[in-house]
Amino acid sequence: MRKPLMAGNWKMFKTPAETQAFFEKFLPLVEKSTHCEILICPPFVNLAAAAAATAGSGVGVGGQNLYWAPEGAFTGEISAPMLKAAGCRSVIIGHSERRQFFGETDETVAKKTKAALAAGLQPVVCVGEMLDERESGQTNAVLERQFRGGLGSLTPQEFAQVVIAYEPVWAIGTGRTATPEIAADAHKFLREQVRGSFPDSAAGVRILYGGSVKPDNIKGLMAQPDIDGALVGGASLEAISFASIVNF
Ligand code: 13P
């Protein structure tokens, strides 16, 4: 049985004080929510505030990115051991915004995923097609390429720690969420990819959906058998809204 994971990706929003205020409001709303795991990924500068606020609560904290070297002369970067030491449980890797704006490739996703695993962090690895790729019938080819390129070189033991997030780029921040059926097709295809490369993990790997997830569409998405949770952007910034997604 796969335990759902509800993850908030705050992107470049909130200060440490706003982080603390969010958790003061959010934690009481999810105190009894043991049906799923909960994760918040704030900007790096808020990790200390998030770790302090969530200590002992069961709510996990994660990074939004990392660099693969453990330390070194890499101005502006943050390593996996640093995230771990700052209280992170997980880290988002290969988000489409990083692929689009910051030169992330399947190759860097693979390096970052291995670095995260080596530091004991759970990688939440994002895949997803752009609108033109969907419209030209390339969705599965893109997902297969991203899956193989980003995750194909892991050992089965490593892969067993990974969470996949399917985020169709055309649904991110647009209010145009994938229908549960469209999402379900992609999740089914991704699980088949896992079955081909890591058969022992096919039944257990969690595949999250991301892209305009809101309190009013989460139920339909979670009703799909291959959707094991959500990676939520905008609607995770507000405590009541994210709590109602968690408590769908
Ligand atoms: P939105 O929920 O704002 O569409 O963002 C989705 C996302 O990119 C989560 O990683």
Image (cartoon, helix red, strand yellow):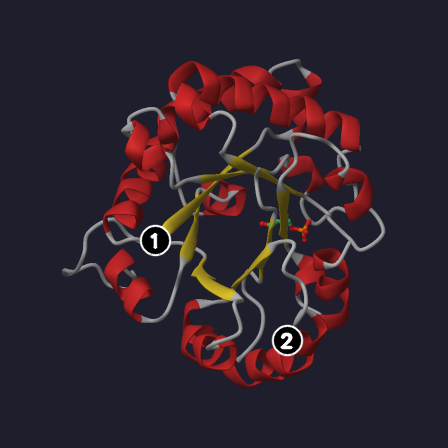
Above or below for 241 versus 66? below
- Tag 1's secondary structure? loop
Q: Residue at x 56, y 78 (%)?
A: 19
Q: What residue is disc 1 on? A: 121
159 vs 184, left or right, is left
**Label 2, label 1: how many angstroms apart (C-alpha)?**
23 Å
Q: Which amino acid does the dot numbered 2 rest on?
A: Leu
Q: Position of residue 11 (x, y in %)?
A: 55, 60
Q: Residue at x 71, y 40 (%)?
A: 171
Instruction: Note whether ligand 1 is within 8 Å of mark 2.
Output: no
Q: Nearer the viewer, residue 86 or 174?
A: 86
Q: Residues within 10 Å of mark 2 (few under 14, many from 20)?
A: some
Using the rendered view, name the quadrant where residue 26 is placed.
bottom right
- Tag 2's secondary structure? helix
**Count of picture labels:** 2
Using the rendered view, name the quadrant where residue 177 is placed.
top right
Q: Residue furthest left?
A: 72
165 vs 213, left or right, is left
Q: Residues within 10 Å of mark 1 (few under 14, many from 20)?
A: many
Q: Which amino acid does the dot numbered 1 rest on?
A: Leu
Above or below for 2 versus 244? above
Q: Position of residue 218 (x, y in %)?
A: 77, 47
150 vs 73, left or right, is right
**Nearer-N-terminus badge (2/1):** 2
Disc ID at residue 162: none
Q: Quadrant of the C terminus?
A: bottom right
Disc ID at residue 27: 2
Q: Residue at x 54, y 64 (%)?
A: 12
Above or below for 235 versus 13? above
